[in-house]
Image (cartoon, rainbow, N blue to C red):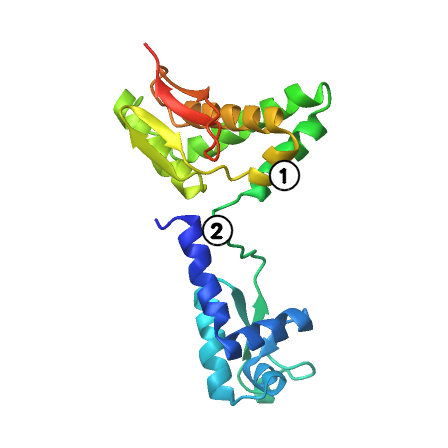
Amino acid sequence: MAGEGTQAWTLVDLLAEPTRRAAYDALRAARAPMTRDEVAAAVGVTRQLAAFHLDQLAEAGLLDVDYARPPGRSGPGAGRPSKRYAVAARDVAVSVPPRRYDLVARILAAGIAAGGDPTDATLAAAEAEGRRVGEVHRRAKPLSRRASLAAAANVLAELGYEPAVQRGTVLLRNCPFDAAVQVAPELVCGMNQRFVAGLLDGMNADPHVTPLLRPAPPDCCVRIATRP
């Protein structure tokens, strides 16, 4: 499976084409399904060109498709239902280097909603979120130490941490929470550590593989190592 970053860039590339973007914007502005003819009229292109771009957007998952007859037409003489398009409920965002402020926002919201001490609750929420992500990649049998490092690096790469495996240690070359770190470094570094701890637990990693706080700017403050 391609990483989320690669997929996002593919979608951005699709939307970079002017006519395709105009069709997408017309659908967003309408806030209701539109036929090919309606989109063509809104954008000022032929029906065939509108159909070409709309089907590409739908194939990429940016549009939803259904079929319906025009309002007021029903029965045997109403003709074939028209193909209609609507904007899918999907966000597209890219950044260089990768950032995951959606993830840090979800963790912070869960921590606040939990009540109690806000720092403890936020750290617990970070670990729970990491465990949830790890369980998606969970293996039936516990992973060896080497396999744990490799598997964690693969998942963290998809999340934008830019991991590098060196001599039995996974270095995280990028912090996806960078702007938040600048506001509350101790809290956010702790969130990173607990998130990775939950991830390893959810993946059924070897218990000797653990995340350590080792600040080394501009890298992430966490690295994964094997303890005795």
Write down the quadrant of residue 159 in the picture: top left
Is there any visible trace of residue 140 in the rendered image?
Answer: no
Is there any visible trace of residue 159 in the rendered image?
Answer: yes
Residue at 53 percent of width and 57 percent of height: 92
Q: Is residue 100 above or below residue 73?
A: above
Residue under circle 2? 96
Residue at 69 percent of width and 25 percent of height: 114
Circle 1 SS class: helix
> Which label sits on residue 11?
none
- Give coordinates of residue 15: x percent, y percent: 50, 69
**Amino acid type of disc 1?**
Ala
Q: With 46 as the anchor, is 137 left or right in this view?
A: left
Closer to the camera in the image, 40 or 153: 153
Pointer 2: residues within 10 angstroms few (<14), some, or many (20+)? few
* Number of marks present in the image shown: 2
Residue under circle 1? 105
Residue at 55 percent of width and 38 percent of height: 177
**Amino acid type of disc 2?**
Val
The residue at the far top in this view is: 228
- Give coordinates of residue 27: x percent, y percent: 62, 72
Pointer 1: residues within 10 angstroms few (<14), some, or many (20+)? few
Circle 2 SS class: loop
Q: For the residues marked 1 and 2, what is the alpha-carbon distance in whole angstroms?
A: 19 Å
- Give coordinates of residue 13: x percent, y percent: 45, 66
